[in-house]
Image (cartoon, rainbow, N blue to C red):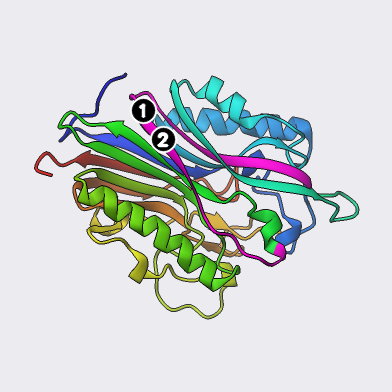
């Protein structure tokens, strides 16, 4: 399928942080209180990447938005996940934006985290007319080693009414990073979204927001799972689950990596999802209950239409 998108036509989109192919349900991570720093083995990583690709293809989404796709990393045994996914998923048109480039980290001593390059992958079979990589400010503390190339991508796909669908793929800093940096990141993204909406375009901004998207006041939660600050939602936009005709966000999209996943025991939260402009009709919105089999994140899947009377 190629060409321009049509208004009042049903499309599907999925966002999925694949955890660089390593973060299976029995995995823990040294930065979150666990011990591991690499995938369990090269073979395990390759088998899990195969499973990730198969699961994505089974969804048959018109658009995919993936995060933590490694290009070259110690943690992923230098397996080029970008090359593998582009060849396997068969979308045909891709945009990749590198958003992570860490120098060699000698910690943990027993298994150094090493050097890693990773990014955001957007895929579709529809024509892509333009794409932009937008840099984001990063923290100045030790966590800068984990956010050295932070960015988001903006992909432009033509619509038959002369407008464009703008797909923004992002992976924001965690809440534990500098508050002013997080606010600045959200301001930049919000400005871009508002400008596209003013131009009459359709906008879907999705990925790993690293904030609790359900909102509410929570005290006994990790500092990286605080509510999304609603004052930074762009004008004429909202989270897709708030306007969906059918909504199922019973399942959380992210788990803590302090130990292997235990249902009902491990801390989980809804960090992943979509912001949509008001000229998009959301038919259904689902956080998929994959029980973190392939990653420390579960995908979020949405069906939508571009309104004709924009």
- Left or right relative to 251: residue 200: left
Q: For residue 128, which numbered disc appears in the image?
A: 1
Work out which quarter of the rendered image holds the C terminus and state it. top left
Which residue is label 2 attached to? 131
State if disc 2 and disc 1 touch (CB < 8 Å). Answer: yes
To which quarter of the image does residue 50 belong? top right
Write the start and end of the magenta stretch as one range. 114-142
Asked if 113 appears above or below 11 in the picture, the reply is below
Asked if 24 appears above or below 262 in the picture, the reply is above
Closest to the observer, 154 or 276: 154
Residue 247 visible in the picture: no
The x and y percentages for residue 302 are 33, 44
Asked if 163 appears above or below 246 in the picture, the reply is above
Residue 131 visible in the picture: yes
Work out which quarter of the rendered image holds the N terminus and state it. top left
What's the distance in space between the residues labelled 1 and 2, CA to CA?
A: 8 Å
Q: For residue 205, which numbered disc appears in the image?
A: none
The x and y percentages for residue 220 are 56, 78
């Amino acid at each position: 399928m190629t060409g321009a998108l049509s208004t009042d036509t049903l499309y599907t989109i999925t966002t999925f942080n694949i955890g660089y192919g390593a973060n299976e349900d029995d995995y823990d991570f040294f930065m979150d209180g666990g011990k591991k720093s690499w995938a369990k083995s090269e073979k395990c990583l390759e088998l899990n990447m195969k499973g990730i690709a198969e699961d994505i293809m089974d969804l048959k989404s018109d658009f995919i938005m993936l995060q933590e796709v490694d290009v070259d990393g110690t943690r992923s045994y230098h397996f080029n996940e970008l090359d593998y996914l582009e060849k396997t998923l068969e979308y045909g048109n891709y945009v990749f934006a590198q958003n992570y480039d860490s120098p060699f980290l000698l910690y943990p001593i027993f298994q150094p985290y090493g050097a890693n390059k990773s990014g955001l992958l957007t895929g579709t079979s529809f024509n892509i007319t333009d794409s932009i990589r937008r840099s984001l400010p990063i923290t100045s503390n030790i966590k800068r080693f984990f956010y050295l190339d932070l960015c988001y991508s903006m992909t432009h796909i033509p619509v038959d009414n002369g407008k464009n669908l703008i797909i923004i793929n992002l992976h924001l800093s965690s809440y534990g990073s500098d508050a002013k940096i997080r606010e600045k990141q959200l301001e930049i993204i919000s400005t871009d979204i508002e400008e596209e909406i003013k131009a009459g375009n359709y906008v879907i901004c999705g990925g790993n927001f690293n904030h609790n998207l359900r909102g509410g006041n929570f005290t006994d939660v990790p500092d990286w799972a605080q509510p999304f600050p609603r004052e930074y939602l762009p004008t004429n936009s909202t989270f897709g689950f708030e306007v969906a005709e059918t909504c199922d966000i019973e399942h959380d999209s992210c788990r803590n990596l302090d130990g292997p996943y235990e249902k009902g025991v491990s801390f989980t939260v809804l960090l992943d999802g979509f912001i949509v402009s008001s000229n998009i009709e959301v038919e259904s919105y689902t956080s998929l209950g994959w029980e973190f089999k392939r990653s420390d994140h579960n995908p979020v899947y949405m069906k939508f239409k571009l309104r004709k009377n924009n």
